[in-house]
Image (cartoon, helix red, strand yellow):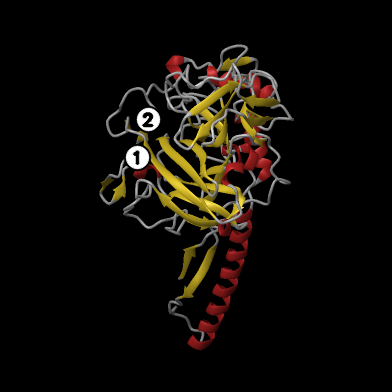
Amino acid sequence: MIVYKMSRCMRYKPLFFVISPTKTKRPQKTMTKISKIFFLIFAVILQVTMMESCRKFDFEQFREIVKQNYLIDSIDEQHTWNLLKERAVRIKSQVDDPDIAYVQVLDGNPFEKEGVEILANRLCTDGNTVSPTFSVPATKTEFWAAAVTNQGKYYVIPIEDKSDVVIGGSRMISNKLMISRPVGQTFTYMFEEDYPYPGDFDFNDVVLRISQQAVAQNKLKLTVTLAAVGATKQLGAAIRFPLLKSSDIEKVTIDEGRRFDEGYPVERYFIDDEKVLVRGRDGSAVINLFDDAHWCMNSDEKNGQVVRMYYNTRNYEVKNESVNMPTVSRTYNIYLNEGIDASFLQLSDIDPFIIANSNGLVVEVHTFTYKYSEAIWHYTNGPGSEDDMVPWALMVPDGDFRYPVEGMFLGRYRNGESTGAYSRYGHSFGEWGRNHTKSEDWWLYPSEAQVYQP
């Protein structure tokens, strides 16, 4: 009998051999020698086979699966599945206030509307100039510049279509009552669990809402909310920072004082390191969020097993199957080493991903930008073999995005027919998939009956 242990790459390594005596007329010594040789050869062949199989998919089969089953039957070959565009602006603070500490770019006027988001934040004293670059939805046209004091007083002025702005003059607003304080830019990340195989493409197997804000020159505040789990198998999650090495970070603390999966009763499987900050395969910094999404939403066990139901993906509850639960959040304070300016790290630069076991292969599911990245696990041969052009994870630049209910397509366009939660003609997910320059506002047009109602 040969006993095997599952390793990081789903290889099976022989740990030891137990040779059971066999009744035979052949001398025992000779038989034992032959048995050992036979089992050794068998183990080597099996190990080599599994090492090869864990490194790659059957790509020809994968392409056929995509062709027959993906949401959209004709993908734009230029697609990057990115709803953002980059803008840059030069801003000078000239408000005659010696206490100015920051200059910010906002997506609205906080004196007139709620929920205004901070798109960029730079240290800046009065009379100085900064030139921030920021990422925004392709459809966004309204921007404001703000000079902010250490006490939180705001001086704001519209940017409009200008590339050079001075905060000051008669158009500046500062003496009105602010409706609500601006908050960090927030994106929604949605994942399908079955990569590389087709699922139901409702993109709600894990839903994360993430914001990031530089609160000091060397400090990032990252807030992660687990909003939904539309799966019945174990799923882990983490965030990779492609622009940061793990050695660039001095420490990470959590405002709530507890990890997402604090007290997890089962041995960790996807990320065996219990530290919050781990080192990625390429040396990059990786924030270890959780090893089991279900446990984070509902830390319940039954017969020694984690209870696995659909959480927040149906507008009605089904006993022992689906439950609506409060979302769960953690806020991470990331302290950077001296010389690294936190304000130059954008939310659009991060790489959130989930980890799943897919037909015996452990895979990471990333957004399209980082689809071929292997943050923790090794399971592919890279993008040269996997040119399918379709995503199993999506980022929507809206912290309140309405994701589909269980089993409802995000948006499907095949054989000339558009269906799903985002299928309004002229504003559909399918049209955007066929042509990346069209329907870039699809995420603003849900079919109310087919999206989750919080």
Q: Quadrant of residue 226?
A: top left
Disc 1 residue type (three-letter): Met
Identify the secondary structure beneath mark 2.
loop
* Residue 439 shows in the view: yes
Q: Residue furthest left?
A: 303
Above or below 405: residue 246: below
Identify the secondary structure beneath mark 1.
helix
Give percent across and percent down for residue 111: 47, 19
Residue in the picture at 73% in, 46% down: 384
Crowd around label 1: few <14 · some 14–19 · many ≥20 (10 Å): many
Residue closer to the observer: 216 or 35: 216
Give percent across and percent down for residue 366: 57, 42
Q: Which residue is mark 1?
A: 297
Q: CA distance from mark 1 to mark 2?
A: 10 Å
Disc 2 residue type (three-letter): Asn
Crowd around label 2: few <14 · some 14–19 · many ≥20 (10 Å): many
Above or below 93: residue 62: below
Q: Which residue is mark 2?
A: 312
Q: Quadrant of residue 297?
A: top left
